[in-house]
Image: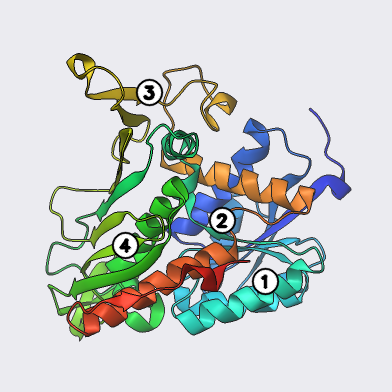
Amino acid sequence: MTQVSESDVLGVGLVGTSFMGRVHTQAWTLAPRAFDLALTPRVVAVAGQNPERTAAFAARHDIARASSDWRDLLDDPHVDVIDICVPGDLHAGIAEAALAAGKHVLCEKPLSNSLAEAESMVAAARSAREHGIQSMVGYSYRFVPALAHARELVRTGRLGKIRHVRAQYLQDWIVAEDFPLVWRLDRERAGSGALGDLGAHIVDAATFVTGHRLIGVSALTETFVTERPLPAESGALAATAGTGRGPVTVDDAAVFIGRTDGGALATFEATRFASGRKNAMRLEVNGSLGSISFDFENPNELWFHDHTVDESEAGFRRIHVTEPSHPFAGAWWPAGHGLGYDHAFVHEVVEFTRAIADRRTPDPSFEDGLAVQRVLDAVERSAAGQARWVPLDPRESDL
């Protein structure tokens, strides 16, 4: 067994022990096993609110140190990276303190609960970057091989001039009206509902694949179930109902249209009420020379239409994105053996680890997170004004 020297270890301090904390822990563990990295990431400490649960999490994942206070991770000399996997209301405080303490930061999406917090986080990230401290926001769908390949098709001109961007994120996990009032349905904790949780992903994915940014939006949001049972024990996506009821203070669904700086028309839909859809994150892009279509419920497939071929052979064809030549796929299994949800997070931490080793800004940066936050803010302002047009300046979040 190859020994890794302490100088080559990138110590990770994880903040959060729920669903996303588990996903990130697995990603950090698998990354150096599947990819050649100059630094070897290792989760060395974890912090969570509940001491017993945090200790159990540490034991299950073989993490050396556990704490009920995330500030302890900032004082730990073995921690080089703070990985933030907690609700949005905690992002800004933890990230800014970590950057000030000289720790690299990976922060789950969306970057924050408000535009002002996101701007403050970017200012902190830029200041830390001057001292070699890197920061990254966790838009994991950028690292799905099929979407990364779609970006290459756009970048190399296979679609021609982009005219339409069509994005959806459809789930159904709170269709039942007696589903408990978990933290994701509380505006103070989550910032927004389907808009920030799901809409943020498709805004970033559309930008990533096309290179276009929105210059204006018109939006509507809706809360279909305005009151729910209080949870006996709250979780991110699952909980049991307790006694009493409370108000839902976020949107259940958001729809909006927009224009991009590249001259395309764009439509977006994010909902937790699409009965029968579990994780249908979809993106279709139509251009003058062709189109691409993707649905994460079939994550290893990208559909491509080449409009330059004779009409007798025209139509969408499936690209099975599992070949060694496809982004990230070559590090895993033989061609045809597909990847899943968790692999995107492995690719995400691989990018972050390499960026730290190379002393460069990772992709996506906090600035990319701010760009999405500006769109979310504009959508909420538009919806509050009954779909009034809200302009955006994509240059505001540039480096």
Amino acid tagged 1: Ala
Would you say residue 233 is visible in this rendering? Answer: no
Q: Please give the label number shown on residue 125.
A: 1
Which of the two labelled residues, at mark 4 and mark 1, occupies the earlier sequence position? 1
* Label 4, residues with CA under 10 Å away: few <14, some 14-19, many ≥20: many
| Cα distance between the residues tagged 4 and 1 | 29 Å
Q: Nearer the viewer, mark 3 or mark 4?
A: 4
Q: Secondary structure at mark 3?
A: strand
Q: Please give the label number shown on residue 320.
A: 3
Pick the front one: 365 or 191: 365
Disc 2 + disc 3, Cβ < 8 Å: no
Q: Secondary structure at mark 2?
A: loop
In the rendered image, which residue does mark 2 sit on? 364
* Side of 351 where 114 appears, left or right: left
Disc 4 + disc 1, Cβ < 8 Å: no
Q: Please give the label number shown on residue 296.
A: none
In the rendered image, which residue does mark 4 sit on? 259
